[in-house]
Amino acid sequence: MFILDVEDDLQLALVEPSFAPLYFDIVSKQRDYLGQWLAWPPHAGDEAFFLKFIKKSLHDYADGKSLVCAMFYQNELVGNIGFNEINHDLQTVEIGYWLAHDYQGKGIVSKSVAKLIEFAFIELKMQKVQISAAVDNLPSRAVCERLGFQLEGILTRAENLNGRVVDHAVYGLSFETWKTI
């Protein structure tokens, strides 16, 4: 199994079917919170939803198209992070993530994103990492800014979040810039 150790109490593990009930448990309790910034929580009605997501993620991983990991903090699944897209032709990856509300403010996402950036540049030989976040999702935007990403632009009407159309702030970090941070 693919596991990245971020630090002693924080690991990123390639998704596997046994994670489906753990994901479902989080979303069942935090559907409204997660639905503020993610389109899929209202549709995640059972473990089968997550089994389908995990199966697709594993196929895309095998094809080199993505890398989707569960975030484990103190041995508990607390969220999800990964390369939503790996573009080998352009040597770019796009990172996406979500974290259970109870674990916000502990540096989990910032540390996990930093580890994936390192993995993208060192192991995958990528030249750019990108993150898109809703303009009003200030915590997610703060992660990007804290890690040295540059705001590249705003995409208007970029996503429909359960009936609410939002703009996206698009952040980028090049390998050249990362080396100097």
Image (spheres, rainbow, N blue to C red):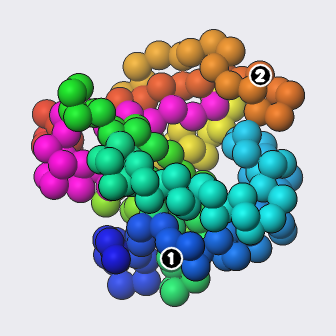
Q: Position of residue 171 (x, y in %)?
A: 42, 29
Give whichever of discs 2 and 1 has the lower sequence position: 1
103 is within the stretch colored magenta:
no
Between 160 and 19, the one nearer to me in the picture: 19
Q: Position of residue 162 (x, y in %)?
A: 83, 34
Task: Please state the extent of the stretch shown in magenta in the rendering.
Answer: 116-134
Q: Residue at x 68, y 32 (%)?
A: 136
Q: Secondary structure at mark 2?
A: strand
* Tag 2 residue: 165
Q: Position of residue 20 (x, y in %)?
A: 65, 71
Q: Is residue 1 above or below residue 59?
A: below
Quadrant of the frame with the C terminus: top left
| Residue occupied by mark 1 | 72
Q: Which residue is pictured at 81% across the width and 49% down the height?
A: 43
Q: Work out whether residue 107 can be spotted.
A: no
In front here: 107 or 162? 162
